[in-house]
Image: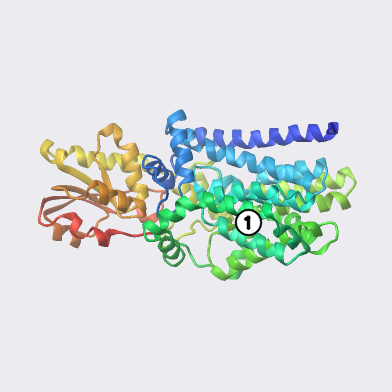
């Protein structure tokens, strides 16, 4: 049996420690910070309580993971984020291990892992429970396995690639773009010979089998995810010029990290040493051009490819910079370049301090249309949920006992509905209905009609068409939340004229 060199064994242990440190950092800032649940976490918890083969805006894997997590650990912010923290730790560890597949040594492996661990994009995406954390993990594991296949030529790895592609699809449909781009990259290089064999066919069959449950769900339900993606692109995400897209990519991994991954991209595309992995470089270029062409303001769409490029860049630098002082300078500059962006993506500064910091940096705080805040959206959407639910609870308690027995609550978004459903349990709040994404279907199935409706942000004309008595009893308030959550009227509507179900079709919005 071949013995692993002592230096490599030590490096492998160090990679585990870096990954573990990443996990601990995320846990500590969650517990010690001045922030709570992220808006989407309320929705994911609602999904986890209603397991299905699909949802309007994502496949079923992430809610299944969350359902198992909440059974074991509970529903606190720290508990539900453990899977995301673990995903981030594995991304960090995998990036370092990928260096060995690319022919690099200990310095390149440790520098890669440390760089990925402090990258703003990685910390942001894996800092709360989200399908995006599992998307990034699936992409990193897929590219790592493909790197190994290209190095070894071991056709059996197609089965692992099929498994990762299928599970990645069941986490987020964007896995299709990675598989398509990687396939195109292989076809355009000498690695195309690896595509035509029984193992590749079996891997594709495995991926298809794993994807089939959600595909069937889409067919049965009229492909709601296609409508969601279309609306998100046209109605939700801010449009971005090519220059904005490029700047977003530079900020994603830290500005001073760019020379490393750009060297990595050049190494795999243009050199003989890195040519074995040219197909992955082509895949990145194709997806980068697709991102520019889509004019979308979501730079994290390519996050899962950067650990491979950072690893390749570290290997290329390691082969040319031999002095320890030069290597230390590279590591220091890369890591230092990530530090200014960390308070923007992880909750280490109180909101008031953070608002001054982002103003000083000149950071754009929103990625969605019509939504602003003094602090970045990633953190603004973790603020002031308890006061919001307390305000709704106060309205509910003001009702007569008879009204309380009949009441339902209407919320305009899945985040507000999920927050009331989760945080309002202690106050005995009734069921919440909402028209956004899968909440629209759940509300329709569970019933939307009531003689008493506490309506948040509802169209007053709709309320007056449905109820004889409509009284505004409050307005939502918050300081650091996104602007759309501020200033919403809270109405109490009584004495039904027509059932809410008569207009419920118009309440549906996928975005």
Query: At 16% across and 48% down in the image, what residue appears?
Result: 450
Q: Quadrant of residue 183?
A: bottom right
Q: Say above or below: 300 vs 110.
A: below
Specify whether residue 353 is in view. Answer: yes
Image quadrant holding the N terminus, namely top right
Query: At 25% across and 38% down in the image, what residue appears?
Result: 429
Query: At 83% across and 43% down in the image, what residue appears?
Result: 105
- Residue 115 percent location from the top left of the image: 70, 46
SS at mark 1 in the image: helix
Is residue 495 toward the left or the right of residue 297 in the image? left
Residue under pointer 1: 251
Q: Residue furthest right?
A: 323
- Residue 383 percent location from the top left of the image: 42, 44
Query: At 43% across and 57% down in the image, what residue appears?
Result: 372
Is residue 211 toward the left or the right of residue 93 in the image? left
Is residue 313 toward the left or the right of residue 249 in the image? right
Count residues near mark 1 (Cα–Cα under 10 Å), then give few for <14, some for 14-19, many for 20+. Answer: many
């Amino acid at each position: 049996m071949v013995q692993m060199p002592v230096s490599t064994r030590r490096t492998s242990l160090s990679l585990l420690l870096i990954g573990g440190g990443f996990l601990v950092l995320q846990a500590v800032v969650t517990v010690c910070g001045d922030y709570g649940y992220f808006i989407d976490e309320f929705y994911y918890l609602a999904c986890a309580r209603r397991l299905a083969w699909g949802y309007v805006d994502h496949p079923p894997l992430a809610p299944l993971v969350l359902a198992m997590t909440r059974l074991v650990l509970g529903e606190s912010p720290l508990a539900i984020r453990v899977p995301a923290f673990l995903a981030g730790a594995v991304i960090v560890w995998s990036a370092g291990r990928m260096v060995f597949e690319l022919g690099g040594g200990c310095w390149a492996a440790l520098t890669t892992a440390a760089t990925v661990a402090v990258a703003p994009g990685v910390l942001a995406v894996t800092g709360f429970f989200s399908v995006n954390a599992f998307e990034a993990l699936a992409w990193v594991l897929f590219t790592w396995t493909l790197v190994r296949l290209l190095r070894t030529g071991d056709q059996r790895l197609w089965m692992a690639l099929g498994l990762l592609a299928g599970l990645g699809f069941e986490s987020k449909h964007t896995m299709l773009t990675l598989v398509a781009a990687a396939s195109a990259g292989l076809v355009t290089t000498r690695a195309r010979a690896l595509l035509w064999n029984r193992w590749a066919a079996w891997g594709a069959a495995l991926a298809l089998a794993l994807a089939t449950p959600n595909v069937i769900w889409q067919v049965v339900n009229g492909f709601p995810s296609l409508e969601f993606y279309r609306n998100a692109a046209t109605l939700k995400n801010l449009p971005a010029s090519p220059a904005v897209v490029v700047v977003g990519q530079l900020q994603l991994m830290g500005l001073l990290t760019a020379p490393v991954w750009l060297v990595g991209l050049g190494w795999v595309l243009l050199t003989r040493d890195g040519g074995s992995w040219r197909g992955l470089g082509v895949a990145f270029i194709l997806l980068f051009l697709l991102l520019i062409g889509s004019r979308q303001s979501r730079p994290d769409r390519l996050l899962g490819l950067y650990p491979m490029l950072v690893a390749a860049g570290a290997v290329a630098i390691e082969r040319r910079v031999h002095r320890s002082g030069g290597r230390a300078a590279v590591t220091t500059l890369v890591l230092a370049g990530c530090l200014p962006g960390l308070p923007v993506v992880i909750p280490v500064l109180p909101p008031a301090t953070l608002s001054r910091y982002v103003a000083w940096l000149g950071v754009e705080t929103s990625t969605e249309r019509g939504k602003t805040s003094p602090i970045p959206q990633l953190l603004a959407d973790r603020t002031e949920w308890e006061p919001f639910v307390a305000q709704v609870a106060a309205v509910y308690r003001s009702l007569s006992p008879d009204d309380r027995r009949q009441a339902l609550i209407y919320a305009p978004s899945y985040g507000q509905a999920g927050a009331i459903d989760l945080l309002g349990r202690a106050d005995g709040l009734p069921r919440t209905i909402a028209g956004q994404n899968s909440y629209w279907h759940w509300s329709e199935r569970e019933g939307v009609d009531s003689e008493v409706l506490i309506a948040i942000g509802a169209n007053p004309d709709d309320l007056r068409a449905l109820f004889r008595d409509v009284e505004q009893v409050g307005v939502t308030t918050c300081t650091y939340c996104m602007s759309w959550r501020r200033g919403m009227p809270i109405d109490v509507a009584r004495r039904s004229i027509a059932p809410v179900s008569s207009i419920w079709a118009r309440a549906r919005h996928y975005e």
